[in-house]
Image (tube, grey):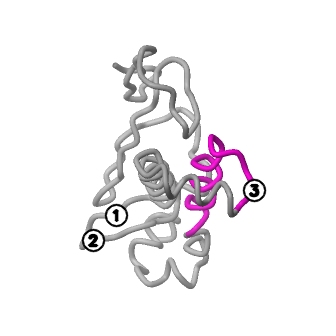
Amino acid sequence: MLNGGIPTVNRNPDEADNDCGTHDGPVPVARAATSGRVLVKTMTPLPRFFRYWGKTHGDDYHLLPYHALDVAAVGCEYLKHHPRLRRFLARALSVPEDHVAQWVSFFIALHDVGKFSESFQSQQLTLFQQLQSRQ
């Protein structure tokens, strides 16, 4: 389904509660930009943090904000299926067990914050210049 030009999927309200946060209504579908192609056109400029790559493979790349969200989602799903680890972390961090997945996902999303540095981004200089519109 398209919602204002952004591909979305509808969340089934009968699904089990999401420990990683809830969202009512359509959920945007995250897609990686690859080979410099723009997948979604918007009327307003994208925030500057969308001008950084998070993963590359050949000419393909995955934008850093999407990479951070992807790894956070994987971490959350992992904890949902490993209650023993979730209980251990809850005790170790002195937080309620039902908050562990959210906290851990938040910190997992931050694990690559250093990739926003120009020194890291310059490892793929042509891509970095393209994303920063410096070419």
Q: Residue at x 49, y 82 (%)?
A: 122
Q: Check disc 2 and report the residue beneath it.
A: 57
Q: Is residue 21 above or below residue 126?
A: above
Residue 79: % across, % down: 48, 51
The earlier-in-sequence mark between 3 and 1 is: 1
Percent coordinates x, y for residue 6 in the rendering:
42, 29
Q: Quadrant of the C terminus?
A: bottom left
Question: Is label 2 in contact with label 1 (beta carbons under 8 Å)?
Answer: yes
Q: Earlier in the sequence, mark 2 or mark 3?
A: 2
Residue 129 position (above or below residue 133): below
Residue interval drawn in magenta: 93-111
Please name the amino acid that badge 1 sits on.
Answer: Tyr
Q: Is residue 117 magenta?
A: no
Q: Nearer the viewer, mark 3 or mark 1?
A: 3
Q: Which residue is mark 3?
A: 94
Residue 87 locus on image (x, y percent): 58, 53
Residue that label 1 marks:
61
Q: Quadrant of the N terminus?
A: top left
Task: Give the residue type at disc 2.
Answer: His
Where disc 1 sits, the SS reads: strand
Q: Is residue 105 left or right of residue 66?
A: right
| Residue 117 badge | none
